[in-house]
Amino acid sequence: MTVSRNEPVSRNALDLLRWQFDLTWSLFEYHLERIEPDDFLWEPADLCWTMRRADDGTWVPDWAETEPDPVPVPTVGWLSWHIGWWWSVACDHAHGRTPRDRSDITWPGAGAPAVEWLRAIRADWLEAVDRLTDADLESTTSLPWQNDARHTVAHLVAWVNAELMKNAAEIGQLRLQRAAGRPSATTG
């Protein structure tokens, strides 16, 4: 969907974006309902980005300011933190709050804590989206495009859908890959 500053964004567009989000979320829920705590920190390759315990007991993500080459394979834990980070900042923008810094986003840990955290962010996002007006949709935002006034809040909503779809697919693939590599109860 291309929305220029000259074409008004309508409630119909928001309804379509909300439908797309709900579809994406239902596909993500398929994996969230089946994910196991051990899935989160399973490393599928030698070169991985994951979550690590800091000295104070909090979880911190592996991170580089510039993308390494080759790019490390993220774990489910890292991907769930990544979703929590970008989506929390998107929620901050959508609610008119001061956006948090990446280092201010704390991953709650593997299993149910991470799943509950992501579901809470979803609720926060939907609260913001459901109150958007036509004027809100047409207003500009810099997230995730720094200093680019060509993008609207409608673009932000579409970006959240795309980013969530991509990250949900990555988590699903890692979950399935780990499950496929386990010995079965009958053979192992």
Image: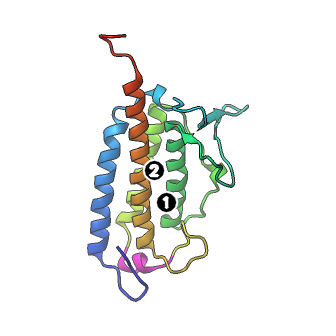
Question: Could you tell me residue 142's position as x and y percent?
Answer: 56, 72
Q: Residue at x 32, y 70 (%)?
A: 14
Question: Could you tell me residue 177's position as x and y percent?
Answer: 40, 32
Residue 165 within the segment the image draws in magenta = no
Residue at mark 1 to residue at mark 2: CA–CA distance: 8 Å
In this rendering, the answer to whether 66 lies above or below 9 is above
Kind of residue sitting beneath label 1: Cys
Q: Give the residues in magenta.
A: 133-140
- Mark 2 lies on a secondary structure that is helix
Classify 10 Å Cα crowding around label 1: few (below 14), some (14-19), many (20 and above). Answer: many
In this rendering, the answer to whether 148 lies above or below 172 is below
Q: Which mark is residue 169?
A: none
Left or right, 161 with reference to 73: left
Q: Quadrant of residue 28?
A: top left
Q: Residue at x 64, y 33 (%)?
A: 52
Q: Please report whichever mark, 1 or 2, sits nearer to the chain's N-terminal start.
A: 1
Q: Main secondary structure of the magenta part?
A: helix
Instruction: Please tell me how many numbered marks the rendered image carries.
Output: 2
Question: Could you tell me residue 136's position as x and y percent?
Answer: 42, 76
Task: Look at the image and name its color scheme.
Answer: rainbow
Please say if the residues under marks 1 and 2 sit with CB atoms less than 8 Å apart: yes
- Mark 1 lies on a secondary structure that is helix
Between 83 and 63, the residue placed more toward the observer is: 63
In this rendering, the answer to whether 26 lies above or below 16 is above
Residue under pointer 2: 121
Between 61 and 118, the residue placed more toward the observer is: 61
Residue under pointer 1: 91
Residue 135 within the segment the image draws in magenta = yes
Q: Residue at x 38, y 26 (%)?
A: 179
Classify 10 Å Cα crowding around label 2: few (below 14), some (14-19), many (20 and above). Answer: some
